[in-house]
Amino acid sequence: MVKKGLWILFATFALLIGLYPMIYFLMDRKFGLLNSKSVELLANTFWNIGFYMHIIFGGIALLIGWTQFSPKMRNRRMALHRKLGKVYVVAVLLSALAGIYIGFFATGGWISSTGFICLGIIWFYTTLKAYLYIKRGAVEQHQKMMVYSYAACFAAVTLRIWLPILTMVYGDFSKAYLVVAWLCWIPNLIVAYLLTRKTTNIDSVVH
């Protein structure tokens, strides 16, 4: 029951934050993280392309990625699992590359920039490796690398959990952002390591 409850919570967060980018198309852009950006940066065409590519494809990856860990889908609807997997891989690779680019302009300077750029590189690498493994038929390695990939993807969720908490703790958004640039993904990868170390069958992670 506990695992089922955690799975439902996990999926709910993924769906909610996966749909979050829609807000940027429905409201004035001067809110949230964009509120910390300069007028010049917000007017930069290349940065805007990178930003919207990152949030749109990242949202898609977050929305569908959690379904890939459902043993019921893999066992009963393998064709759908493969199709969604391909969409996830393409979405991640595009979002990660865009994320690496906009990471150079992150609020807070080189500390936060380095954190987000590292996240983008890890997300890109683990996803590409997961794809290459399954192409070779290395199912166990594919499953493990997918756990790392989605752990990096889930940073979009953990960032939005940690950021308001840290902002209240520090009383300063900029200081909180420096920390969250690393805190949003490092613990996720630690959890991924613990999960993949304990099991050779990824189904036990969600059962």
Image: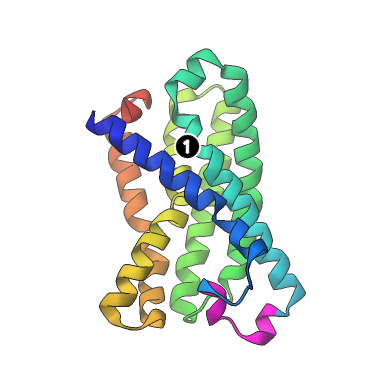
The residue drawn where x is 32% and y is 43% is 193
Assess whether residue 136 is covered by the magenta stretch. no
The residue drawn where x is 30% and y is 28% is 199
Location of residue 4 (image quadrant): top left
Side (left or right) of 152 relative to 92: left
Where is residue 205 shown, x and y percent of the image?
Answer: 33, 30
Vertical side of 33 occupied by 91: above or below: above
Side (left or right) of 4 relative to 59: left
Assess whether residue 39 is covered by the magenta stretch. yes
The residue drawn where x is 66% and y is 81% is 41
Farthest residue toward the top? Answer: 76
Q: Which residues are magenta?
A: 33-42
Location of residue 131 (image quadrant): top right
Kind of residue sitting beneath label 1: Trp
156 or 133: which is nearer to us? Answer: 156
29 or 69: which is nearer to us? Answer: 29
Which of the image's four quarters has the N terminus? Answer: top left
Where is residue 110 shown, x and y percent of the image?
Answer: 48, 79
Residue designated by label 1: 66
**Label 1, residues with CA under 10 Å away: few <14, some 14-19, many ≥20:** many
Farthest residue toward the right? Answer: 45
Residue 139 visible in the snapshot: yes
Residue 97 visible in the snapshot: no
> What secondary structure is the magenta-colored segment mainly?
helix
